Every structure is written in C-alpha cells, then in structure tokens.
Image (spheres, rainbow, N blue to C red):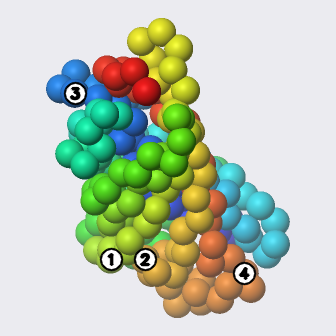
Amino acid sequence: MNIAFLSPFAFAAAAAVLPLTVQAQQAVVPAQSEIRFVSKQMGVPVEGRFKTFSAQINFDPAKLATSKIAFTVDTGSVDIGPEANAELPKPVWFNVAQFPKATFQSSSIKRIDASKFEVAGKLSIKGLSSDVVVPVTLAQSGATTTATGAFPIKRLTFRIGEQEWSDTAMVADEVQVKFKLALTGVGKL
C-alpha cells in the first residue's frame, strides 16, 4: 500500500498562500494553480496533489492588518496514485466521510520584504487544529499575481495515518507542502 496520502498538508500551504489576493474581486485561478506535497514512505519521497480547493481572499498589501485568507481543501480530492487514492478516504487516514474538508484561516500576515510574506493561521484537518506559519513569495505579471511557497506539516498532529501507520519508520511524520497559486485582483505590491 502506498502511504503517500499525507497530502492534506499540501492544502495548508495553499491556504496560507492565498492571502496574496486583494479586494472584493480577488480569486484563485484553479487551472493555473496547484497544491502538491511530498511525504516519505520507507525513506522514499512520494509526491501527490490536491485537485479541488477554494479560497475566500481579502488581501491588500497596503493594509495587512485587515487582510484575511480562508482556504478549503476537499480531502477526498487527493491524487497520489490508484492504490493510495483508494486508502486515503478511510478513517485511519483522512476519514473523508466524517471530515470531507481541511481548512486554513489566517490570523495575521507579515511583510518580510517587497515580495515575501509570512501568513500565520490555524490549519484544521480531521477535526484537529494547529497553528502554522506559511512563507509566501509573490510575483506579479500583468493582472496575475503568482504566490509560491513550501512549508512542513507533521501528519501525526492531525491523526493522519493512525494505528499501524503511526510508525514513522514506515511513513515519515513530516510532510512538505508546496504550492503555486495564480491570483487575480491583487493590488500592486
């Protein structure tokens, strides 16, 4: 069985990145966006992605104190491969029947430099929440702002991979979340 279904952490990355859009007309362009994750199974990196996610964004680079990001990932949309995709919805992993969504809600956004930000907030997966800080780099080209970044999440914090799968010799606890989000409506940085 492929244990790479640790991708719920990828959504967190994307969630933290979304604060990069602005005003009422801000939106994520799904066709140009992706949330990926890399976990290790028996020391071997395994990559996956989430196919379905959404966000509510109110990001103004000039008003970070009032900027907010809310992000939702459909946990059942994980794609790692047929074997893992069949296991992921089960209670021992994401328990998709009871917890179909993973969420991120920002609490603060901090500017690091002209194009880099840190988005702090609460990540909730499988009914459990944890504080996370997501580094985000923004690049603008025309009307599109691209937010990219990566951050680690500990799967056992969210009871992802319970019972025999809690052994970190089989599946590492740390999952690296990577994201690239195309955003519209973001003001000039």
Q: Which residue position holds label 2?
A: 158
Residue 170, label in figure: 4
Residue 128, label in figure: 1
Counting from the top left corner in percent of width and height, residue 44 is at 81, 66
Counting from the top left corner in percent of width and height, residue 79 is at 56, 48
In the rendered image, the vertical position of residue 41 relative to residue 143, given as above or below: below
Earlier residue among tags 4 and 3: 3
Q: Secondary structure at mark 3?
A: loop
- Of circles 1 and 3, the one toward us is 3
- Of circles 3 and 2, the one toward us is 3
Which class describes the residues within 10 Å of circle 1: few (<14), some (14-19), or many (20+)? Answer: few
Alpha carbons under labels 2 and 1: distance apart? 6 Å
Earlier residue among tags 1 and 3: 3
Tell me the residue at 74%/70% (across/down).
41
User: Is the Cβ of the residue at disc 2 closer than 8 Å to that at disc 4?
Assistant: no
User: Is the Cβ of the residue at disc 1 closer than 8 Å to that at disc 4?
Assistant: no
Tell me the residue at 34%/22% (across/down).
187
**Amino acid bearing label 3:** Gln
Counting from the top left corner in percent of width and height, residue 150 is at 60, 52
Q: Farthest residue to the top: give it.
A: 142
Earlier residue among tags 1 and 4: 1
**Amino acid bearing label 1:** Leu
Quarter of the view holding residue 40 = bottom right
Q: 142 or 115: nearer the eye?
A: 115
